[in-house]
Image (tube, grey):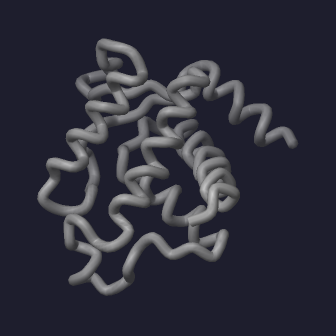
Amino acid sequence: MAGEHHQAIIADALDQVLVRGRVDWLQLVEVEDAIIQAARQHGVELWHRDPEVSLLRHDQWFGERLELTLTLLGRAFDQGLLEAGDVTPGFEVWAGAPADWIERIESGWRKLETQLSMGDVAWLNLTERGREATNQHTRR
């Protein structure tokens, strides 16, 4: 995939993620879904519609979805828009730096025996800066 498409997909998916994050905590699978939807809008397919194929752990698009999702998250973490953690009775931010969160997410995702599903690997929380960014975005 060309770098230009890559950046456009990430930007569009990040907008979707921030809007979704205004409502509730986000699951990693929702970020992956935003990547898939944004790619589709740019004429790039990253998911197979055949249910038997889509259950495979490493389908032909796995690496690309992983790379795009981690790039999006890295950007969002570095800009202070999202934070990674676990849902307990509330949201508990993971210890460490954003780079540690990316490493933990990538490691956990690669260890899965199936595609991502609800509650897998990490939860994400929109920060105050993230909320401000979505407020500015929705006012445009």
- How many marks are shown on the rendered structure? 0
Residue 63: image location, x then y, percent: 36, 59
Front residue of 32/139: it is 32
In the displayed structure, would residue 97 be above or below residue 71?
above
Which one is nearer the viewer's eye here, 80 or 59?
A: 59
- 21 or 43: nearer the viewer: 43
Counting from the top left corner in percent of width and height, residue 24 is at: 46, 38
Horizontal side, residue 127 vs residue 50: left or right? right
Whole-percent x, y for residue 87 in the image: 28, 29
Q: Is residue 133 left or right of residue 108?
A: right
Q: In percent of the image, x 60 and y 56: which residue is there?
A: 6
Q: Residue at x 60, y 45 (%)?
A: 14
Residue farthest front in this picture: 2
Q: Residue at x 27, y 82 (%)?
A: 51
- The residue at 27%/56% (across/down) is 116
Q: Could you say which quadrant of the image residue 20 lies in?
A: top right
Task: Mark yes or no: residue 21 visible.
Answer: yes
Q: Quadrant of the C terminus?
A: top right
Horizontal and vertical percent for residue 43? 63, 76
Question: Among all residues in the image, which is located at the extreme bottom?
Answer: 50
* Residue 31 seen in this snapshot: no
Q: Specify the quadrant of the image occupied by residue 40.
A: bottom right
Quadrant location, the N terminus: bottom right
Q: Residue 33 lies in what quarter of the image?
A: bottom left
